Amino acid sequence: MDKTISSANLKALFNKSGDIVQRPLNVAHSGIIVHLFGVDGLMNTMMLDETILQPLSENENLKNIKSEKELMQFLLEGGAYHAFASEVTDYDLLLRYILSGMAALVFDQEQKALIFDVRTFDKRSISEPTDEGVMKGAKDSFNEVLRTNTVLIRRRIRSEYLVIEQLNAGKLSKTDIALVYLSNVADMDTVNRIRDTINNLDIDNISTPAFIEEYLMDNNKSIFPQIMYTQRPDRISANLSDGRVAVVVDGIPFVYILPCQLPMLMQSPEDYANHYFIGSSLRVIRYIAMILTTFLPAFYIASTTFQNQMLPTEIALSIQQAKQNVPFSSASEVLGLLIAFEILIEAGLRLPKTVGTAMSILGGLVVGQSAVEAKIVSPTVVVIVALAGIAGFILPNQDLSSGIRVTRFIMAILAAIAGFFGMTAGLILLITHLCSLDNYGVAYMSPFVDVETSNHKDTLFRFPIKYFTKRSKKIAPENRVKQK
Amino acid sequence: MKRILCLIGKFLIVVFLFTGCTHDMSRKEIDEINLIRVLAIDYDQNGYTLSALFNAAGGADPEAGEATEEITKGVGKTPYEAYEDLKAKATKSISLGHTGYFLIGDAAAENGIDVCLDFLSRDETIKMDALFYITKDSKAADFMEKGIKNKQKINEDLEAIRQKQEDLVTRNDNSLVNLLNEMKQTYSSVLIPYLVPEESSFLTPGYAVFDKLKLRDYLDEDTSTGINFIKDIIRNYPIYVENQVGLMVSHSKTNLDSKVNDNRIIITIKVDFESMVKEVNTPEYIFTSKRMNDLVNKQNQYLYEVINMAVNYSKATGQDVFQIARMIEKQNMKKWQELKENWAEMISSIEYKYIFNSKISKSFILG
């Protein structure tokens, strides 16, 4: 394939594409013909007309232009009323620019092109975060446009050390990716590893988040998320200040943060908006909810099927009475209801919002109530499964919540097989698994497993901000002092 | 290699955890089990009778109506045989995992509590804080049956007894775990509260004393109170020093000290206690220095009397009801080696000295 920059080559390439603008332009007074290429809909035509086409057809100074070389020089030096103009000599780069929405003026004799950034496209305005809303705090969130997202970060960190590296991935999609970090804080080994991972991506398209997430995770076989995402620019700026690295992907309305540890996924922006005591209390409730959602159904199965003496007598009697005439075993009841719960969630997600509410009422109240009255399930099981389900939604990170939902099933099955022994075995395996996870050189369970006590000030409890004096040694080894 | 080792390690942990489990891991749905709430153990010439009290219906399900109590009996030459017979006769599987109370009949207690407790201590599901009571001059099963005829809720009444006990003393020494520990102390007597019926409830007037794990005596209320003071387990205790003035011991601390000189044992009982005025039914103003001193002396005298009753019982019968043996063993370990051979005879010759420090505080009066 001929990779010479020429209008003929480009015309041949885009021959069948109806959205590619191909137009010869007769430059006023000079008799030179240049060719304009661009993607219809991605270019701001008004800006194109005013800043490039109008000067090319009206500027009196064009009388002195004798060659394409002089014309290129003229346009680069102010002949075109446009701030972002550059010369391109590489054919592939030119294609990438054109397909990303820039306007190209191709000079056939010079075999070069001039690129003008006149990109525009329909985009969502900056809105409130849908998943991470706070009562007290910033209300802006990322959207699908990479540059908007990097601007939101830059607005919060006006440091000269903030680096926004532009990368590109996807053989076909050529998706823009920005690697964001603070060069004086972040561990450059981590930055280099992430950059290499993105540069070495050999996939066609980054159409959904999983296409990049799975490559960025160190251990993608685990059901526990090892990459944190957020819609909130304030969270990103806080994590960048801690020495972490952000990955902004064009087309994905949130930003990734690496390396990621489990305690990070239990933190909510609200923790830092409230008084530290209230923030800590909320966080403790979240950890309790995590334990409840993981183990409550399993505990119920184990205690009602194997070791009933673990229950207080009055509760045991109450459960006993509630289970009278129910034909299924406790394990079948719990697992059945857990599956029904997941079905309800899935149904609620797929249906339109208005129908979804009716569906929740129908599923949760009508079917649940009827099932209890018909003695298909005992009321205690409904309470247990509902409590476990609701507790799961308290977790701030949806990926963690999903991982915990799967773990809940595994624990319930183990409890159904061997009661508390099964649960204990499951717990040991779970802890072993979590402790074996490593994320860009940082333990997933860090700082719970760290000996360094300074890291423990923002884990189970949120200490007052004045105590956050040092960054983690593993995440920011070179610049550890946050404040004196 | 590392992964293989890790997998083997995890496998070994799981195998270790499941060692000793039965093939079905003792699977039994909770609604397929009859939970024994109270177990009565009786003895006669034919052997042992175990009477289990279950809750028949009621509870969380309003349609099931009010809970009723049912008794199922099992007989056998030993308590374990009787328990197996009980299992066979019960309509569902039975479990001791929720049995909060064990009633031991008079005759079974005389035959030895070790026989009754042995099979219970081998049940892995049993509640270690389950409480034991002796039914005075009665079979335990008759005691329960009379209660049920009398429209009593046996379990609830026993629960009320436990609560009242906890109001007065700081710990229940009649729990299974405590009795099993005390049974190992062969030099001391085991004490278990006894029950007597009272119209439509039960009362625990005092302790039943066991000599070599066989029932010996029933102590009256004052002697039992004296023992509670010496054992330092008093939480609250009412003292009526005069007809018009009622006091409540709100704090009590007892220290026992032993001295052994040439096989002569001197035990110093030091009681520091404080009481509050709970009732004054006299127009006379009692909160004067003179009257208060007078009341303090009277409450000291009262305490001396109840403690002395307990001490006299111990000396008269040669029963170590205060667990002096354990104390001497701790405080004078070398001397104990010489004393323990003739301990039974020495109990009667122990000298006791008393030191009482008490005060009375004024209670608040509203209005």
Image (cartoon, grey):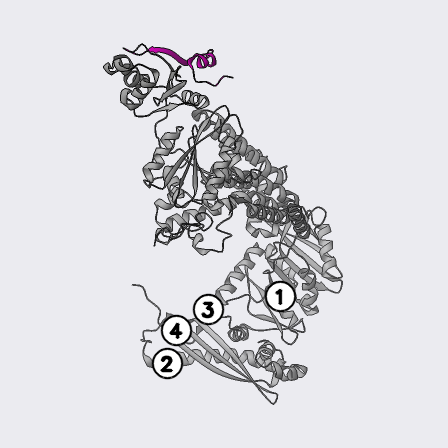
Mark 2: amino acid: Asn
Mark 3: amino acid: Asn
Label whose residue precedes the other's in the sequence (4 or 3): 3
Subunit ID for the residue under disc 3:
B
User: What range of the chain is rendered magenta?
Assistant: A1-29
Circles 3 and 1 on the same chain: yes
Q: Which mark is residue B245?
A: 4
Contact between marks 4 and 1 (CB within 8 A): the answer is no
How far across and down, in percent of the image, does residue A82 sit?
A: 29, 23
* C-alpha span from label 4 to label 2: 14 Å
Q: Quadrant of the C terminus of chain B?
A: bottom left
Indicate which label's residue lies in the foreground, 4 or 3. Answer: 3
Q: Please determine whether, in this image, residue B291 is positioned above or below residue B250.
A: below
Circles 4 and 1 on the same chain: yes
Q: Which residue is mark 1?
A: B134
Circles 2 and 1 on the same chain: yes
Q: Nearer the viewer, residue A316 or A45?
A: A45
Q: Residues within 10 Å of mark 1 (few under 14, many from 20)?
A: many
* C-alpha span from label 3 to label 1: 24 Å
- Asked whether, in this view, residue A18 is left or right of residue B56, the answer is left
Q: Is residue A178 magenta?
A: no
* C-alpha span from label 2 to label 3: 21 Å
Q: Which residue is mark 3?
A: B236
Label whose residue precedes the other's in the sequence (3 or 1): 1
The local secondary structure at tag 2 comes to helix
Determine the image quadrant of residue A357. Answer: top left
Q: Residues within 10 Å of mark 2 (few under 14, many from 20)?
A: some
The local secondary structure at tag 4 comes to strand
Subunit ID for the residue under disc 2:
B
Q: Nearer the viewer, residue B200 or A296?
A: A296
Contact between marks 2 and 3 (CB within 8 A): the answer is no
Mark 4: amino acid: Val
